[in-house]
Amino acid sequence: MRKFLFAAILAAVAQPCFAESPDIVSTYIDITYDQRGPNFIEWFAKQRTSPEGVAITKAVASYYGVPPEVVNLSTEQFWKGQLQDTAAGQEHRGMLASPAGYQICSAKRDGEASITGPSTLNVAVWRRPDFSGLAWYAVVPTPGALGAGGNWAHANFFVSFVKSDPATWDKYKAKCDPPNTPQGGRYLVLECKGQNCNGPSWF
């Protein structure tokens, strides 16, 4: 039976979850569906490194023009609790929900997406009353011939969240995806079928 990998790099710093309730929080997510990947626990353990957390903190802080200590990446256990992933055959749907009291601000791709010809991957920022966060849909077909190579869909994102109270949101919304737009929509940040990728766009 074909196996798929869904994985997230959830970079962490050693401090309690949102103890200081910063304006901005962020994490790094790797969306991968691959029949040849190791299981989630093995993959996650190999990627959990503090230098990566420090680098992400600096990058996010620089983008928003805030001191690095303002951007709290929380713990990997916390972000794992925000993730959902469901599969039905070759179709996969996943979500990374905004923390309570926060609204998703941006999802910046890190590097190029890697997707085999028959596979698809759509990733979107959702800013709606029923769900706030990052959502994605992937189709990764099973190879038909015996011994045929595998299929996969893979992309990395830096995902940032801003406090949802109007004063804080208004302060940072110009740097969100999309900028200066009202809350309540779905914004496609990546739409790929094989190596043919489009976006961003409303849908």
Image: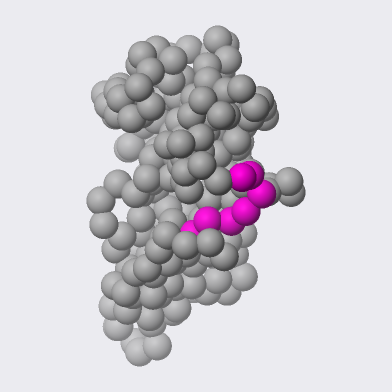
Instruction: Please report the residue visible at 31 percent of the width from the left and 60 percent of the height from the top.
Output: 113
**Residue 142 falls in which quadrant of the image?**
bottom left
Residue 167 placed where, x, y %?
61, 22
**Residue in front for this viewpoint, 46 or 9:** 9
Residue extent of the magenta highlight? 182-188
Answer whether residue 136 is magenta in the image.
no
Residue 129 placed where, x, y %?
73, 46
Instruction: Please report the residue visible at 34 percent of the width from the left and 69 percent of the height from the top.
Output: 197
Q: Is residue 34 left or right of residue 164?
A: left
**Residue in front for this viewpoint, 51 or 108:** 108
Residue 118 placed where, x, y %?
38, 80
Furthest residue in direction right, as rendered: 130
**Residue in front for this viewpoint, 58 or 138:** 58
Q: Is residue 51 left or right of residue 29?
A: left
Answer whether residue 183 is magenta in the image.
yes
Instruction: Please report the residue visible at 47 percent of the width from the left and 62 percent of the height from the top.
Output: 201
187 w.r.t. 59: above or below: below
Residue 33 placed where, x, y %?
42, 61
Furthest residue in direction bottom, as rendered: 145
Could one spot residue 55 in this view of the protein?
A: yes
